[in-house]
Image (cartoon, rainbow, N blue to C red):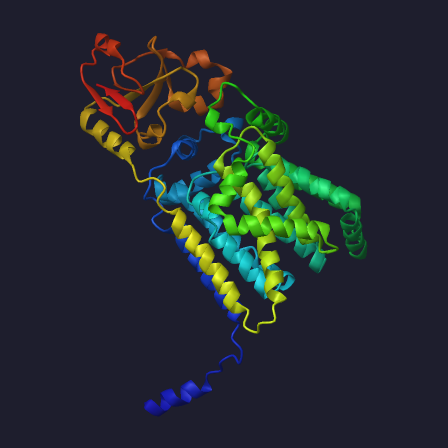
Amino acid sequence: MSKFFVMAFMLLKFPKEIDKTLIIFIIISITGFSIRLYNLAQNPLDFDESIHAYISFLLFKYDIYTYEPTTHGPFLYYITAAIFHVLGDKILSARLMPAIFGGAMVLLFLPLRRHLGNIKFLLISCMIAFSYSFITYSRLLRHDIFLAFFILAFIVYIILFFELHSIKYLYLGFAFLAITMAIKPTIYIFIFIMVYFVILNKNILYKMFEILKRQKIKLYYIIISAAFIFIAINYLFYNSMTDGFYKAFSSWITIYASDPNRKESLFPPFYFYISHLLKFEFLVFVTGFIGGLYYIFSKNKNYFILFCSFWALTSLLIFSMMSYKTPELTLNILLPFIIISGFFLGDIIERMFFKNRMIFILIIILLLIFSVFINYPLSYNTNNEYEEISQFIKTIKGDQNEIYFLSYLGNFYTIQWPLPWYLREYNLLQSDNKSNAIELNYLFDPKYSDNAKDFVHPFRTRGIIIASAYITSMEKFGYKNIKHFEGSGIYIYY
């Protein structure tokens, strides 16, 4: 028996050279996925997440959905509702797709390994995998990680088209760009930057025409095909020819324009994104900024890195000039900075005279991992008082199945989010101080906007009242008990 194992061992053929780069990349990818998936349901859904999850729940449970520009495009809701069908409506399943798409961003660089070279390929991959911002927003139910994924996928397949001269990559690129139209209107900033760069560098268009000419493909055929892809995907998600382009674009101007009635926290100073990047992405931002300036003013004719440099610096300027600023929009700026940073540091390492350059790559990887643990992106909020509130309501509800959120009727943002998500199995109504009420589901139903009066009615039955303030007049309606939750400021009358 022992001789058999010896002979079998000798017959095994081991590769003479192990692909160290691929092994390191696999380790980086697995680690990136693991960080994003680790304890994903630990924290409660925040304000925005709960709205997104609740809309997805209504789509999953009641097939109710209408496009509302303030909650951005429908892609997030359809893909989250699909996961709810498979895994159930839980916090874990709500956050699963952002985590998967966030981790998959690392894998998108694999087709570019030959184009980038081993060192730059590894650096850019680990910067995406261990970026504080990308880890954070891969663990939240937000639109931005989906947008970043499809923008990167579009860029990768356009590069493959120019490299391999295969028309299928051009069509795939158009498809990925079309999907971004169903995610978030900030895509128009990227499209503007890209078109402006192509206008400044017309050689890119000439090269594309040469490839098409060699393939014997007419330009009008490409234009018609691209238009069909955009219209088909747009109609698939929006079920309308105006919502995806006109309504989304016009709402973008409204959403990001100055509004004196909005919270001051949404209108921070010009340097908001710069300070955010310096705090959480110091290595990437500083090296990316220096590298971007270097490549723009150098004689480098690598249009890919030249575009990324232009994209990084221009997006930083445009987003900083916009009055409306939020931390998650940083991903739009950070993505090109990561590519530039990895490319620039790779150039420096490749020009070093040291033989073992892998040491420098490992040092950079360790610095990125160290920065992640310093900023604690895995435990941003552990106060889950909303779970306590939902448990308390279960103990007092008795045969009452109706819960009224006391707030201004018609404005669902004034409801005490994220409670509707945690109480989604109850009959939830929004009411005002005149005892008018409307079922919460209808606020997201297109029928409501068409004929609101059909759905507004007086209190039908006595139920539990949830408000964000202490209201002395509740005793007149027979509510003699009150429970106050200090963490969330919620008052429950029953």
Pick whichever, 169 or 333, lies toward us. 333
Residue at the location (69% across, 55% down)?
Answer: 161
Q: Is residue 17 left or right of residue 157?
A: left
At a point 59% along the width and 64% down the height, the residue shown is 349
Q: Quadrant of residue 220?
A: top right
Does 146 sit above or below residue 162? Answer: above
- Judge from the rendering whether residue 3 lies leftward or rightward of residue 351; answer left or right: left
Residue 338 or 473: which is nearer the viewer?
Answer: 338
For this orientation, the residue located farthest to the bottom is: 3
Residue 227 horizontal/vertical position (percent): 70, 39
Could you say which quadrant of the image residue 7 lies in? bottom left
Closer to the camera, 199 or 159?
199
Task: Check the image and report above or below for 432 versus 108.
Answer: above
Residue 32, image x, y percentages: 44, 55
Residue 6 at x, y = what percent? 38, 89
One can see residue 228 in this view: no
Does residue 138 show up?
yes
Q: Quadrant of the N terminus?
A: bottom left
Total labels drawn: 0
In this picture, residue 263 sits left or right of residue 159: left
Relative to residue 404, is residue 148 depicted above or below? Answer: below
Q: Quadrant of the C terminus?
A: top left
Decide which of 416, 130 is in the foreground and name it: 130
Left or right: 297, with 92 as reference point: right
Residue at (58, 40) in percent of width and height: 180
Q: Quadrant of residue 370?
A: bottom left
Residue occupying the point 50% across, 60% down: 364
Instruction: Tell me where residue 325 appears, x and y as whole percent.
Output: 52, 32
